[in-house]
């Protein structure tokens, strides 16, 4: 270990629901193929907020204290045995899910579906919001000098966008509609554009989000109305779809980043015959869908679980300027003010898009 003896490792720990504390933990020991990362930038994600407020997401429930955070970049502080492609001082983005590399899914390249996946800040696995994080070297991606660590931390949500554009099979000139203009929706729009989409529409309930979206890889923006009191979901979805089609056309691909049943229904209705609907958002676990539309018009519904094989692509996109993620970083806080940063994201105030914890 090349670090000074008195080096501390402050960690942002979720002890239980509603209770985040800063704890000093030992600096992890490195094993074969590991590197130690001095984490410099971490974006706060909706899932971190969800664990904080609810103590779990679906099957992943907090049973013991866990370090939060998974959207990180940092500097290599030490390398373990067997690491060849990284050295101390390298600047890297961290792909937070480490797969087994041996199972059928891993060998077929869809390692995001690996049953042995250990993913940062998904109970019981600790996250990256700490000074020093031990990570598998082959899940660290070197950043070129002109790509900042703050940008590198945005590769995680950008990966969701790249994976969704691939799953949607977006081709040159395609029309794409994205539901939800939060960070992930915006990055899905950006990735769709980068994949060649000719026209990207984004839809949201919040006017300020659409105002920002006007400046970010979208060609048109649709303000969704709320359902009338007592209006059944499918009725609302058909009515709203007719509204949307006054200004928009049916899409080759629709990417839903909300998880809301009505948005998934509208995604099907707004898809061309033979189009794709990609489900990025996580909402109700059982939802009513217009199955007859899906069958008779051959609409392909595709699930999304995180991403795979996206980091190297994302680094090249940032390096070449094909996608600029800098405008999304609206606020940053030091690690010591993490609780404030979490509150800021929860309240969504001051036009917050991506809030990062720095240092
Ligand atoms: Zn995330
Ligand atoms: Zn595997």
Image (cartoon, grey):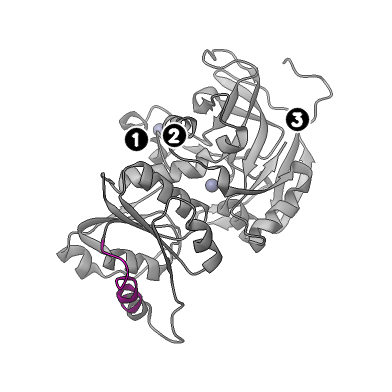
108 left or right of 333 in image? left
Badge 3 element: loop
CB at disc 1 and ligand 2 closer than 8 Å: yes
Q: Is residue 17 visible?
A: no
Which-is-in-front pick, marks 3 and 2? 2
Q: Where residue 343 sits in the image (x, y, percent)? A: 70, 58
What range of the chain is rendered magenta?
238-250
What residue is disc 2 on? 317
Q: Earlier in the sequence, mark 3 or mark 2?
A: 3
What residue is disc 1 on? 105
| Residue shown at the point (32%, 73%) measured from the top left | 241
Q: Is residue 137 visible?
A: yes
Image quadrant holding the C terminus, namely: top right
Badge 2 element: helix
> Quadrant of residue 301 in the image?
bottom left
Using the numbered discs, state the Cα–Cα distance from disc 2 to disc 1 in whole angstroms: 26 Å
């Amino acid at each position: 270990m090349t670090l000074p003896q008195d080096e501390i490792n402050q960690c942002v720990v979720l002890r239980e629901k509603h209770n985040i504390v800063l704890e000093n933990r030992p600096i992890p020991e490195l094993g074969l193929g590991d590197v130690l990362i001095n984490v410099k930038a971490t974006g706060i994600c909706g899932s971190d907020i969800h664990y904080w407020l609810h103590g779990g997401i679906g099957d992943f429930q907090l049973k013991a204290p866990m370090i939060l955070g998974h959207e990180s970049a940092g500097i290599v502080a030490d390398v373990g045995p067997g690491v060849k492609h990284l050295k101390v001082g390298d600047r890297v983005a961290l792909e937070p899910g480490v797969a087994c590399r041996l199972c059928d899914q891993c060998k077929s390249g869809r390692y995001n579906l690996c049953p042995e996946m250990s993913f940062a800040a998904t109970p019981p696995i600790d996250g990256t919001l700490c000074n020093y994080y031990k990570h598998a070297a082959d899940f660290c991606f070197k950043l070129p000098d002109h790509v900042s660590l703050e940008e590198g931390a945005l590769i995680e949500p950008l990966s969701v966008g790249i994976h969704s554009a691939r799953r949607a099979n977006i081709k040159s000139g395609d029309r794409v509609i994205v539901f939800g203009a939060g960070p992930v929706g915006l990055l899905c729009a950006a990735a769709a554009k980068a994949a060649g989409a000719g026209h990207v529409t984004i839809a949201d309930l919040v006017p300020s989000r659409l105002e920002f979206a006007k400046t970010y890889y979208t060609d048109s923006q649709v303000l969704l109305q709320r359902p009338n009191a007592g209006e059944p979901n499918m009725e609302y979805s058909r009515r709203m779809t007719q509204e949307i089609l006054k200004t928009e056309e049916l899409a080759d691909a629709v990417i839903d980043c909300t998880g809301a049943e009505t948005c998934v229904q509208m995604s099907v209705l707004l898809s061309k015959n033979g189009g794709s609907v990609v489900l990025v958002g996580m909402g109700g676990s059982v939802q009513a869908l217009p199955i007859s539309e899906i069958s008779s018009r051959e609409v392909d519904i595709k699930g999304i679980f995180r991403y795979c094989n996206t980091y190297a692509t994302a680094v090249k996109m940032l390096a070449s300027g094909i996608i600029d993620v800098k405008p999304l970083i609206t606020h940053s806080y030091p690690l010591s003010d993490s609780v404030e940063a979490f509150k800021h994201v929860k309240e969504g105030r001051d036009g917050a898009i991506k809030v990062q914890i720095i240092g």
